[in-house]
Image (spheres, rainbow, N blue to C red):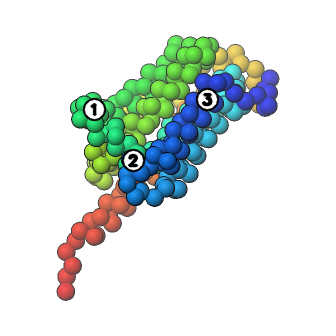
Protein backbone atom coordinates (compact mmCIF):
# COMPACT_ATOMS: atom_id res chain seq x y z
CA UNK A 1 0.00 0.00 0.00
CA UNK A 2 0.96 3.66 0.09
CA UNK A 3 3.95 4.73 2.15
CA UNK A 4 3.23 8.38 2.89
CA UNK A 5 6.76 8.79 4.20
CA UNK A 6 8.24 7.89 0.82
CA UNK A 7 9.83 10.95 -0.80
CA UNK A 8 12.13 10.75 -3.79
CA UNK A 9 15.59 12.05 -2.94
CA UNK A 10 17.49 10.80 -5.98
CA UNK A 11 20.59 12.87 -6.81
CA UNK A 12 19.41 13.65 -10.35
CA UNK A 13 16.14 15.10 -9.03
CA UNK A 14 17.22 16.94 -5.89
CA UNK A 15 20.63 17.77 -7.35
CA UNK A 16 19.12 19.08 -10.57
CA UNK A 17 16.72 21.37 -8.73
CA UNK A 18 19.49 22.59 -6.41
CA UNK A 19 21.75 23.35 -9.38
CA UNK A 20 18.95 25.30 -11.09
CA UNK A 21 18.29 27.25 -7.90
CA UNK A 22 22.01 27.91 -7.41
CA UNK A 23 22.48 29.13 -10.99
CA UNK A 24 19.50 31.44 -10.62
CA UNK A 25 20.91 32.82 -7.36
CA UNK A 26 24.33 33.43 -8.94
CA UNK A 27 23.05 35.14 -12.08
CA UNK A 28 20.47 37.28 -10.27
CA UNK A 29 22.92 38.03 -7.44
CA UNK A 30 26.69 38.43 -7.90
CA UNK A 31 26.53 38.38 -11.72
CA UNK A 32 23.46 40.60 -12.04
CA UNK A 33 25.50 43.71 -12.82
CA UNK A 34 27.27 41.90 -15.64
CA UNK A 35 23.94 40.98 -17.25
CA UNK A 36 22.09 44.25 -16.59
CA UNK A 37 23.91 47.17 -15.03
CA UNK A 38 21.91 48.77 -12.25
CA UNK A 39 19.18 46.13 -12.22
CA UNK A 40 17.68 45.63 -8.73
CA UNK A 41 17.40 42.16 -7.31
CA UNK A 42 14.17 40.67 -8.77
CA UNK A 43 12.65 39.66 -5.44
CA UNK A 44 9.15 38.98 -6.77
CA UNK A 45 10.44 37.02 -9.76
CA UNK A 46 12.80 35.02 -7.53
CA UNK A 47 9.92 33.98 -5.28
CA UNK A 48 8.02 32.73 -8.32
CA UNK A 49 11.04 30.87 -9.68
CA UNK A 50 11.80 29.09 -6.42
CA UNK A 51 8.09 28.33 -5.96
CA UNK A 52 8.20 26.66 -9.40
CA UNK A 53 11.12 24.47 -8.29
CA UNK A 54 9.29 23.56 -5.08
CA UNK A 55 6.08 22.65 -6.93
CA UNK A 56 8.09 20.59 -9.42
CA UNK A 57 9.60 18.63 -6.54
CA UNK A 58 6.25 18.17 -4.80
CA UNK A 59 4.76 16.87 -8.05
CA UNK A 60 7.44 14.26 -8.79
CA UNK A 61 9.18 13.76 -5.44
CA UNK A 62 6.35 13.58 -2.91
CA UNK A 63 4.12 10.55 -2.18
CA UNK A 64 1.81 11.89 -4.91
CA UNK A 65 4.24 10.33 -7.40
CA UNK A 66 3.80 6.89 -5.83
CA UNK A 67 0.00 7.19 -5.79
CA UNK A 68 -0.08 8.35 -9.41
CA UNK A 69 2.42 5.77 -10.63
CA UNK A 70 0.95 2.70 -8.92
CA UNK A 71 -2.66 3.29 -7.90
CA UNK A 72 -4.71 6.17 -9.39
CA UNK A 73 -4.79 7.65 -12.86
CA UNK A 74 -6.55 10.71 -11.42
CA UNK A 75 -3.61 11.33 -9.05
CA UNK A 76 -1.24 11.01 -11.99
CA UNK A 77 -3.32 13.62 -13.83
CA UNK A 78 -3.01 16.02 -10.90
CA UNK A 79 0.75 15.45 -10.96
CA UNK A 80 0.94 16.38 -14.64
CA UNK A 81 -1.20 19.46 -14.12
CA UNK A 82 1.08 20.69 -11.35
CA UNK A 83 4.02 20.38 -13.74
CA UNK A 84 2.34 21.89 -16.80
CA UNK A 85 0.35 24.68 -15.20
CA UNK A 86 1.66 25.77 -11.80
CA UNK A 87 5.37 24.92 -12.17
CA UNK A 88 5.74 25.99 -15.81
CA UNK A 89 3.86 29.29 -15.37
CA UNK A 90 5.78 30.26 -12.23
CA UNK A 91 9.07 29.25 -13.87
CA UNK A 92 8.51 31.67 -16.76
CA UNK A 93 7.21 34.44 -14.48
CA UNK A 94 10.41 34.03 -12.47
CA UNK A 95 12.69 34.90 -15.41
CA UNK A 96 13.57 38.61 -15.77
CA UNK A 97 14.11 39.69 -19.36
CA UNK A 98 17.75 40.56 -18.78
CA UNK A 99 18.38 37.07 -17.41
CA UNK A 100 17.38 35.33 -20.65
CA UNK A 101 18.77 38.01 -23.01
CA UNK A 102 22.22 36.38 -23.46
CA UNK A 103 20.36 33.46 -25.04
CA UNK A 104 17.46 35.17 -26.80
CA UNK A 105 19.70 37.90 -28.24
CA UNK A 106 22.42 35.54 -29.52
CA UNK A 107 22.58 35.99 -33.32
CA UNK A 108 23.21 32.29 -33.97
CA UNK A 109 20.04 31.34 -32.07
CA UNK A 110 17.61 33.78 -33.67
CA UNK A 111 16.23 31.41 -36.30
CA UNK A 112 15.90 28.32 -34.05
CA UNK A 113 14.32 30.37 -31.27
CA UNK A 114 11.92 32.02 -33.69
CA UNK A 115 10.75 28.59 -34.78
CA UNK A 116 10.54 27.25 -31.21
CA UNK A 117 8.55 30.24 -29.94
CA UNK A 118 6.22 30.56 -32.93
CA UNK A 119 2.66 30.05 -31.56
CA UNK A 120 1.82 27.56 -34.31
CA UNK A 121 4.83 25.45 -33.29
CA UNK A 122 4.43 25.80 -29.52
CA UNK A 123 0.72 25.01 -29.59
CA UNK A 124 1.17 22.06 -31.96
CA UNK A 125 4.02 20.57 -29.93
CA UNK A 126 2.04 20.94 -26.72
CA UNK A 127 -1.03 19.19 -28.13
CA UNK A 128 1.05 16.51 -29.87
CA UNK A 129 3.26 15.64 -26.88
CA UNK A 130 0.37 15.65 -24.43
CA UNK A 131 -1.83 13.53 -26.68
CA UNK A 132 0.76 10.99 -27.84
CA UNK A 133 1.96 10.25 -24.30
CA UNK A 134 -1.62 9.32 -23.35
CA UNK A 135 -1.71 6.49 -25.87
CA UNK A 136 -2.17 3.32 -23.77
CA UNK A 137 1.05 1.64 -24.90
CA UNK A 138 3.26 4.69 -24.19
CA UNK A 139 1.52 5.71 -21.00
CA UNK A 140 1.73 2.25 -19.47
CA UNK A 141 5.34 1.92 -20.62
CA UNK A 142 6.16 5.05 -18.63
CA UNK A 143 4.46 3.56 -15.58
CA UNK A 144 6.60 0.42 -15.84
CA UNK A 145 9.98 2.04 -16.63
CA UNK A 146 11.35 4.74 -14.31
CA UNK A 147 13.61 6.33 -16.94
CA UNK A 148 10.78 6.53 -19.46
CA UNK A 149 8.58 8.09 -16.78
CA UNK A 150 11.22 10.74 -16.09
CA UNK A 151 11.47 11.45 -19.82
CA UNK A 152 7.67 11.78 -20.00
CA UNK A 153 7.60 14.33 -17.18
CA UNK A 154 10.47 16.35 -18.63
CA UNK A 155 8.76 16.42 -22.01
CA UNK A 156 5.50 17.56 -20.41
CA UNK A 157 7.30 20.34 -18.53
CA UNK A 158 9.31 21.41 -21.58
CA UNK A 159 6.21 21.41 -23.80
CA UNK A 160 4.39 23.50 -21.19
CA UNK A 161 7.20 26.08 -21.10
CA UNK A 162 6.92 26.41 -24.87
CA UNK A 163 3.12 26.54 -24.71
CA UNK A 164 3.11 29.40 -22.21
CA UNK A 165 5.91 31.34 -23.91
CA UNK A 166 3.66 33.26 -26.39
CA UNK A 167 1.68 34.53 -23.38
CA UNK A 168 4.34 34.97 -20.68
CA UNK A 169 7.59 35.53 -22.56
CA UNK A 170 10.05 37.71 -20.61
CA UNK A 171 12.10 38.29 -23.76
CA UNK A 172 12.35 41.55 -25.67
CA UNK A 173 13.50 39.66 -28.76
CA UNK A 174 10.63 37.15 -28.67
CA UNK A 175 7.85 38.98 -26.80
CA UNK A 176 4.32 37.77 -26.07
CA UNK A 177 1.96 37.84 -29.02
CA UNK A 178 -0.88 40.38 -29.23
CA UNK A 179 -3.76 40.05 -26.79
CA UNK A 180 -6.28 39.00 -29.47
CA UNK A 181 -3.70 36.50 -30.70
CA UNK A 182 -3.31 35.14 -27.17
CA UNK A 183 -7.06 34.62 -26.87
CA UNK A 184 -7.28 32.83 -30.21
CA UNK A 185 -4.22 30.73 -29.31
CA UNK A 186 -5.77 29.58 -26.02
CA UNK A 187 -9.04 28.59 -27.68
CA UNK A 188 -7.37 26.69 -30.53
CA UNK A 189 -5.12 24.70 -28.18
CA UNK A 190 -8.08 23.89 -25.92
CA UNK A 191 -9.94 22.54 -28.95
CA UNK A 192 -6.85 20.58 -29.98
CA UNK A 193 -6.77 18.81 -26.61
CA UNK A 194 -10.44 17.80 -26.76
CA UNK A 195 -9.87 14.44 -28.52
CA UNK A 196 -7.50 13.11 -25.84
CA UNK A 197 -9.93 14.23 -23.12
CA UNK A 198 -12.80 12.47 -24.89
CA UNK A 199 -10.66 9.38 -25.49
CA UNK A 200 -9.94 8.97 -21.78
CA UNK A 201 -13.29 10.05 -20.35
CA UNK A 202 -15.69 8.24 -22.67
CA UNK A 203 -13.77 5.06 -23.39
CA UNK A 204 -15.78 1.96 -22.60
CA UNK A 205 -12.60 0.11 -21.64
CA UNK A 206 -9.95 0.62 -19.00
CA UNK A 207 -7.13 2.06 -21.09
CA UNK A 208 -4.15 1.47 -18.83
CA UNK A 209 -3.55 -2.03 -17.38
CA UNK A 210 -1.51 -0.66 -14.47
CA UNK A 211 -4.59 1.04 -13.06
CA UNK A 212 -7.00 -1.72 -14.05
CA UNK A 213 -5.15 -4.23 -11.85
CA UNK A 214 -3.93 -1.81 -9.17
CA UNK A 215 -5.08 -2.35 -5.57
CA UNK A 216 -8.10 -0.15 -4.83
CA UNK A 217 -7.02 2.31 -2.14
CA UNK A 218 -10.47 3.93 -1.93
CA UNK A 219 -13.41 1.64 -1.22
CA UNK A 220 -15.96 1.65 -4.01
CA UNK A 221 -13.77 3.72 -6.31
CA UNK A 222 -13.26 1.47 -9.32
CA UNK A 223 -10.71 1.75 -12.09
CA UNK A 224 -13.50 2.94 -14.40
CA UNK A 225 -14.49 5.71 -12.00
CA UNK A 226 -10.84 6.67 -11.62
CA UNK A 227 -10.44 6.94 -15.39
CA UNK A 228 -13.56 9.09 -15.72
CA UNK A 229 -12.34 11.37 -12.92
CA UNK A 230 -8.94 11.65 -14.56
CA UNK A 231 -10.49 12.68 -17.87
CA UNK A 232 -12.78 15.15 -16.14
CA UNK A 233 -9.84 16.67 -14.26
CA UNK A 234 -7.91 16.95 -17.50
CA UNK A 235 -10.73 18.90 -19.13
CA UNK A 236 -12.10 20.93 -16.21
CA UNK A 237 -8.76 22.05 -14.80
CA UNK A 238 -7.32 22.62 -18.26
CA UNK A 239 -10.32 24.70 -19.32
CA UNK A 240 -10.31 26.65 -16.04
CA UNK A 241 -6.64 27.56 -16.53
CA UNK A 242 -7.14 28.41 -20.20
CA UNK A 243 -10.23 30.53 -19.55
CA UNK A 244 -8.50 32.35 -16.70
CA UNK A 245 -5.62 33.16 -19.04
CA UNK A 246 -8.18 34.15 -21.69
CA UNK A 247 -9.84 36.53 -19.23
CA UNK A 248 -6.49 38.08 -18.26
CA UNK A 249 -5.60 38.63 -21.92
CA UNK A 250 -9.02 40.16 -22.62
CA UNK A 251 -8.75 42.47 -19.61
CA UNK A 252 -5.26 43.63 -20.63
CA UNK A 253 -6.45 44.14 -24.21
CA UNK A 254 -9.31 46.27 -22.92
CA UNK A 255 -6.92 48.29 -20.76
CA UNK A 256 -4.48 48.78 -23.63
CA UNK A 257 -7.33 49.86 -25.94
CA UNK A 258 -8.52 52.40 -23.38
CA UNK A 259 -5.06 53.88 -22.96
CA UNK A 260 -4.61 54.14 -26.72
CA UNK A 261 -7.98 55.79 -27.33
CA UNK A 262 -7.76 59.54 -28.15
CA UNK A 263 -8.82 61.88 -25.38
CA UNK A 264 -11.75 64.16 -26.17
CA UNK A 265 -12.23 67.63 -24.73
Residue 219 location in percent, x, y?
Answer: 79, 30
Q: Which residue is mark 2?
A: 34
Given residues 76 and 32, the one toward you in this image is 32
Mark 3 neighbour density, 10 Å: few (under 14) some (14–19) many (20 or more) = few
Point out the residue furthest to the bottom here: 265
* Secondary structure at numbered mark 2: helix
Q: Which residue appears at 58% of the width and 46% of the height?
A: 51
- Left or right of residue 79: residue 215: right
User: Is label 1 in contact with label 2 (beta carbons under 8 Å)?
Assistant: no
Query: Which label sits in the foreground, 3 or 2?
Result: 2
Q: CA distance from mark 3 to mark 2?
A: 26 Å
The image shows residue 105 at horizontal and vertical percentages of 28, 41
Q: Secondary structure at mark 1?
A: helix
- Quadrant assignment for the C terminus: bottom left
Is 22 situated above or below 148? below
Residue at position x 45%, y 31% in the image: 158
Q: Quadrant of the N terminus?
A: top right
Q: Earlier in the sequence, mark 1 or mark 2?
A: 2
Is residue 50 among what the camera can see? yes
Q: Which residue is mark 1?
A: 109
**Residue beneath the point at 52% across and 13% down:** 137
Residue, x 23% and y 35% (percent of image)?
A: 107
> Label 3: which residue?
15
Amino acid sequence: MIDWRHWHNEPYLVGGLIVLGWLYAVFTGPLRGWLESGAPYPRGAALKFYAALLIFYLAVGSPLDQVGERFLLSAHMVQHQLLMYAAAVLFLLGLPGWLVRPITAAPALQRPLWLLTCPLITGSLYVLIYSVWHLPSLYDWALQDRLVHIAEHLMFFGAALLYWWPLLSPSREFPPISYPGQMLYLVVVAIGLTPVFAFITFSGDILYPTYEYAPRIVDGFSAANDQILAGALMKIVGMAVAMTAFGVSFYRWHQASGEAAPQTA
